[in-house]
Amino acid sequence: MSERRTRDAHAQYPHDAPRASWRRIWDYGRPHWKALLVGGLLSFLGGMTGILQPLVAKVVIEALGAGESLVRPLLVLTAAVIGGALISAAGAFVLERTGQSVVLAVRRQLVSRLLRLRVAEVDRLKPGDLVSRLTADTTLLRTVATSGISDAVTSSVLLVAGIVLMAVMDPVLFGVTAVVVVVAAITMVAVLPRIGRATEASQAALGEMGSQLERVFGAFRTIKASSAETVEARRLDASARRAWTKGVAQAGWSAVAGVTAWLSTNVAFLVVLGFGGARVASGALEVSSLIAFLLLLFYLMEPISTLVSAATDLQSGLAAVRRIDEVGALEGEDTDASEPHRAAGAETLDGHADAGVTTPAGKVAGTRHNGVHRTPVPGARQPARVSFADVVFRYADGLPLVHHGVTFEAAGAGLTALVGPSGAGKTTVFSLLERFYDATGGSVSVDGVDVRDWPLAGLRGAIGYVEQDAPVLDGTLRDNLVLAAPDATDTDVEEVVGRARLSELVGRLPDGIDSAVGHRGTTLSGGERQRVAIARALLRRPRLLLLDEATSQLDAANEAALKEVMLDAARDTNVMVVAHRLSTVTSADRIVVLDAGVVRAVGTHEQLVASDDLYRDLAASQLLTAS
Ligand SMILES: Nc1ncnc2c1ncn2[C@@H]1O[C@H](COP(=O)(O)OP(=O)(O)OP(=O)(O)O)[C@@H](O)[C@H]1O
């Protein structure tokens, strides 16, 4: 059951995601190799002082037997103990600091990657799971990519040094020890991969819990209103239990690894004591040599247990790396989308009135897009020309077609309304223009150039988009307004606040435009959120303004006022609206009637009332007649 769940979680990610390997963990540590080397060396030196102690102890015992002064060897021993502790502590700090740096670097990479994912990818993934990959999985990497690596290396070196010393000291006793250690090593090889698998399943269960939480808090009021707290708590509890079960399995296997290491050294200790004792009794071995051998074995316990926990951590790290790399294998957008808004605006504000001079990807002759952003020319802003030519589209393989060959033009300034029944594919038209998705067939073009040939930043910089549910982000009202136009001046903001009829709201809020609006704008009404979203889009001074049901929650007075704003904007901007309320669109310059993924008619309100049955029915159902 849980195996299946883990597989389900992976099924959303590409199958060609790289399999994590030890080398992959090293990839994370490599940029910090100098710090790793210093930290590793310090830890190694600290460990070496420990391993030298049996040799010094041998000297002390021999000095005791010979009646010599113990002061010197004891001073050396004390210096070795204190010095070793200090050196080990310094090494641990350097490694821990490096670990934090590794996590920071991975988180930065992941954040940048996540924000550049294609909308299509994010639409099908669970945000809670992505968040857990960014937080919990990167945290797992912290110790692994640094102290994990250095512990594995230093403990191995110490172990080898100890083994050589033991073999030199007494080959017979070493042979006895080796038998025990080999048995333990075989057990380890069987146990360690299970720790990795259990960790991965446990992390996946955590991610699932994050998704459930995100689901609950995304619709908290609905859950309350549906009295669904208990049911939802049960679902969350089930995820928590799965995480617990996997965590316990991981702890169980780690315990097996730990006890194997402990038993092997202790059994070896006892065997050496018995066997060595007999050899001392028979006169084949000096007492001091037996004590030194036993002490050496004793001191090797630490590198052995460190090696085991490093191997355990590395297995957990592999699990984390697999989950992080799965995000890396998701499809991202063209990197140019990260260009600053100003740069994007500069290009698009130049104005591309003439066909052929627009050069989004340098494909069309004329003014080349060569990375030099010309200063915007006031008044030179030209409305965008939009054209859909036989566009065929489905959201994903296996899903039905949404557009079956959509063709229409919306060229230049003016108001174009997309109307039609629910599910006809109106919002999808906007998603294709913004390149959230790419057409399966046909061509979507802006200014005569296929949107796929535009630099993304340039394309999106030309568009102001108000989504259907007018999202408002946590932050202040000002943060929300300048989101798409960070360089807007106070005067610009004030002007747009007035145009979007937000002045009264700003006057009422305790800190005016700098008041916090709460998570998802919960302190605002639905209509206020829509006006904020419209103001945000207007502030960008777009050449193409897309409004998806942008006035659906406004009262009559505000709707009428924003209709004026829309018509005003349409004088020098290509404004496209999706509206169910035909009152919003009667004055549109052109109305495109979409039905079941095809354009069935284009015309003005009067023309369509006269010529198109579906439009006439839509108009009649809203008590509208041609004026
Ligand atoms: N992300 C998506 N993944 C899969 N299918 C989707 C996705 N978004 C929309 N659809 C489907 O595509 C079809 C068209 O959706 P679209 O949102 O474009 O319709 P619409 O005309 O805007 O509808 P409405 O007026 O109800 O908003 C619908 O059948 C919808 O279920």
Image: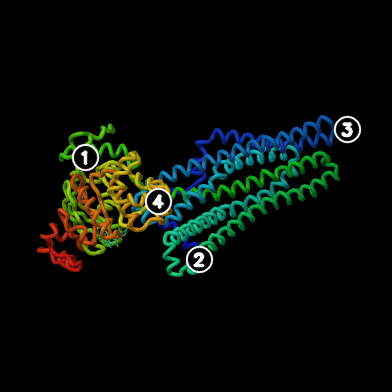
Quarter of the C terminus within the rendering: bottom left
Q: Residue at x 81, y 33 (%)?
A: 74
Label 4 or label 3, whichever lies nearer to me, is 4
Side of 199 where 627 appears, left or right: left
Side of 115 where 155 appears, left or right: right
Q: Residue at x 77, y 34 (%)?
A: 78
Report the amino acid beneath label 4: Leu
Depth check: give the residue in front, 275 or 93. Answer: 93
Q: Which residue is mark 2?
A: 233
- Residue 509 has which mark? 4
Residue 247 at x, y percent in the picture: 57, 58
| Visual colour scheme | rainbow
Whether disc 2's CB lies below 8 Å from ligand 1 is answered no
Q: How many marks?
A: 4
Q: Earlier in the sequence, mark 1 or mark 4?
A: 1
- Count residues near mark 1 (Cα–Cα under 10 Å), then give few for <14, some for 14-19, many for 20+: many
Whether disc 1's CB lies below 8 Å from ligand 1 is answered no
Asked whether disc 4 touches disc 3, contact meaning CB atoms under 8 Å apart, the reply is no
Q: Which residue is mark 1?
A: 381
Name the element at disc 1. Answer: loop
Q: Image height check: is 163 above or below 524?
A: above
Depth check: give the residue in front, 52 or 93. Answer: 93
Q: Earlier in the sequence, mark 4 or mark 3?
A: 3
- Whole-angstrom CA distance, mark 1 to mark 4, is 35 Å
- Whole-angstrom CA distance, mark 2 to mark 4, is 36 Å
Q: Is residue 565 visible?
A: yes
Name the element at disc 3. Answer: helix
- Residue 66 has which mark? 3
Residue 453 at x, y percent in the picture: 24, 43
Q: Earlier in the sequence, mark 3 or mark 2?
A: 3
